[in-house]
Amino acid sequence: MDENPRHVEADAAGAEAVDQFQQESSTASPTPQQSSKSADDLASQFLQLIVPGAGPYVAYIVEPTRKYNKFAPTIEELWEIVKAADKAGHTAYHACASYKEARHDPKGTPQAQRRWGRTNYNAYGAKAFWLDIDAGPGKPYPDWQAAWQAVLTFCQATGLPIPSVVRSGLGIHVYWPLAQTLDPENWKRYARGLKALCVKHGLQADPSRTADITSVLRTPGTHHRKADVRLVQCDELVGPYGLDQFAILGSVTGTGHKFFLNAQFGPLPTYRANRRSGGVGERLRRLSRTFRPSFAGRIAERCEQVRTLRDTKGQLLEPLWYAALGVLAFAEDGEQLAHEWSSGDDRYTIEETKDRLDRYRQFGPTTCANFYEHNPTICERCPWWEKIKSPIALGHAQKEFQGDCIQQVSETAYQEQASQHHTNSDHTQHD
């Protein structure tokens, strides 16, 4: 599912500054390493640099009839699994984090109830920050070189060190390897800061990957097969870096849409520190039943985020598809229109769409803050921005919207449901 992202171009002064930055940084000019190292050596060196030193690890395999996660106890075995799948003509990814236990939930466990496998609950930690940047026709950048130049401009503006680069097919994946493994909570605090900096400086990275510790990305030495077959290449490896070089990320964290401004680190909110004590999910479900009737057609006319789902027939990035379904799940006519508005994408299935709707009903309507994290430009031009908490309020029959029903649900409850939305998403699309 694709969106129509903005294309950010550097002006002449910016390009000149980037040229100087490249000359001053020995790692700023990517040089493919495949020619001097075997694929096995390169993949092993790369994985050892960017994933934690202790497993288990996860390979994510996409075959014509199924998608699945497979655990590996060591980095060497992780690469062997990925390599074998790629050799068989399948698409294979490595998970960027390591995990606590190499086990899966029983077959048939609803996605919202999964705890094992490649989930946030089972994540042990991460030893890198990363970005997924698309390039090519209809993407934010015309080619990987333009994407790389944008990364250099971003690093110069923020003071972040030069990352390692993987040419993922048409676009690039960039990694900042760390000298230490961060637990999931600390990693996410920094990663959310990185996500905020990308928005602030106009770097067009896929927001669904940046702060998702369960992310999977392409491994050097494998092949991109979405159109023409392309080798995934790793450029010059750099790092690892000390955490002190990422102090800037600590100055732009927070919650909701305020996260993108200037909030500071603080103590973990109570709903995260003690998941059992709040009963947030049940209160949210109870309150959701008090909402006045809301209709998807009215929402789409007034919310551009939901309207994009309708107008593209589902051909948008998965996080935005998920988010829009999280609104339709609570609309009177949402069930039917969720299927109708998603059916124009080749990957649409009745089963997956129904599963997503059912899952969202366990948590509550998607918030505006959730949409903002994935596509802030649309929210910032919305006349209802910061006046309501969820687009569900826009579907009432009244001409004036106060969002009074949405206001009944606590901010904490909405943060809880937002944190659940992207746990272990297997409806995967990466460049």
Image (cartoon, rainbow, N blue to C red):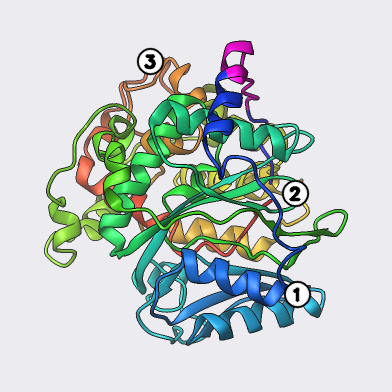
- Foreground pick, 198 / 361: 198
Disc 3 versus disc 2: distance between alpha carbons? 34 Å
Residue 345: image tag: 2
| Above or below for 418 versus 81 | above
- Foreground pick, 227 / 143: 143
* Location of mark 3 (residue): 400
Tell me, yes or no, whether the two marked residues, 1 and 3, touch with CB atoms within 8 Å: no
* Location of mark 1 (residue): 86
Q: What range of the chain is rendered magenta?
A: 6-16
Name the image quarter holding residue 280: bottom left
Disc 1 versus disc 2: distance between alpha carbons? 25 Å
Residue at (64, 69) in percent of width and height: 42
Residue at (61, 53) in percent of width and height: 236
- Amino acid type of the residue that numbered disc 2 sits on in the rendered structure: Asp
Name the image quarter holding residue 45: bottom right
Image location of residue 214, percent across then percent down = 46, 63
